[in-house]
Amino acid sequence: MEVEGKVALVTGAAQGIGKAIIRELLENGASVSLIDIAVEKGEEYKTLLDEEFGEGKAIFIVCDVTNQDQLTDAFQQTVDHFGKLNIVVNNAGINNEKNWEKTINVNLNGMIRGTYLALKHMRKDEGGEGGLIVNMSSLAAHTCTSGLFSRSHFIQRNLAPAPPPLIATQSGSRACTKLSQPNQQDRERERAAHVPGLMPAAHQPVYTATKSGIIGFTRAIAAASEVGQYGVRINTIAPGFVNTALLQSIEHEENMGEYYKYEANIKEMMNHYGILEPLIVAKGVIELAENDTLNGAVMKITVSAGIHYEEYGPQYQAKMR
Ligand code: NAD
């Protein structure tokens, strides 16, 4: 899909990764709808975008993704304003282990809500024009193929003395049926590549649950889209640490709760793995838009390896016909 001339809706668009995605979409010729609860930041950014890209290319809608009526309205306003909807990025997310139910509401329920609303407007089998949905996950997620490289590494670095690492060995299998030590080859690959894979984060169990849920939901709904011929591609991006306000949440007990004590370990991990700039994640969205073969893909982004993809084995790669 060419981004030029398309209409995109991005949640969590007033700052951080969402803000960068908005700019990249505009630079590639799209019109954009910014969705966020942060009223001042959203309005300021919209004013700036009007100056830079000309009035009429961007609208800002105040909306809480946890509120079904508000989000339904925001989608409708976007379609009413621009006349169509082609790309939806469900990006809004928080890190709050203390108020963990809110984290599930924003990160997972908000993303599922946004996906269903996007499908309602875009499904070809229901009169829509098709399109792309991108759901923002994180490397702090777990799937059945995850953890081969970095999980043992994380345990060694953060929870010494290291218990036997739990490693899913059946790469490409539907179920994590067997847990074992990483083999020598895996260890060498880890050392050589220095690439963190998807991994559960000891300091963010609920955040990890939401980000893993996003991957599971997205891959399942991508398969449903293929089977039902929705004409909508649905993919996930899983970045490592990104230089945004969300990173600072680890410094606050009101965000981290009992995991606040891991602050120094998390900072050490940031030093070790490096911190991405939001721009590369925004470029990932453009890549997902332009590559029409990708559906159900999990794009991983790390400092050391850049943009690359989780491998699930050919039998589980949902591809659009
Ligand atoms: P951020 O805090 O800079 O931006 C998040 C944006 O979401 C803010 O503008 C905020 O107002 C908005 N938001 C929060 N709750 C909302 C709600 N209920 N309704 C509407 N908008 C809401 O964070 P970020 O780093 O840009 O995070 C964006 C996404 O990327 C999140 O899903 C996050 O989990 C994910 N992510 C971040 C990192 C990282 O290291 N920063 C890494 C991997 C994934």
Image (tube, rainbow, N blue to C red):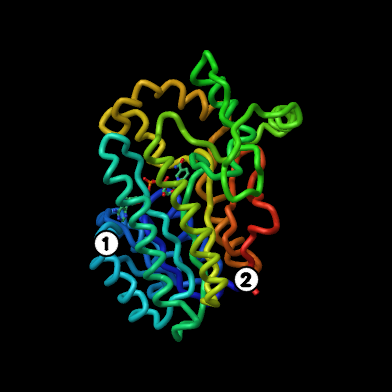
Front position in the image: 296 or 262: 296
Quarter occupied by residue 244: top left
Circle 2: element type? loop
Q: Is there a contact, CB below 8 Å, between mark 2 and mark 1? A: no
Say if disc 1 is inside 8 Å of ligand 1: yes
Type of amino acid under label 1: Cys
Q: Which residue is drawn at 35% across and 69% down?
A: 59
Assign a secondary structure to mark 1: loop
State the quadrant of the N terminus: bottom right
| Residue 308 in sight here | no
Residue 191, given in percent of the width and then of the height, sits at: 71, 27
Task: Using the image, tell me which numbered label, if any, was put on residue 147.
Answer: none
Alpha carbons under labels 2 and 1: distance apart: 32 Å
Q: Which quadrant does the C terminus fall into?
A: bottom right
Question: Residue 303 falls in which quadrant of the image?
Answer: top right
Q: Name the residue under label 1.
A: 63
Query: Which amino acid type corresponds to the residue marked 2 in the rendered image?
Result: Met
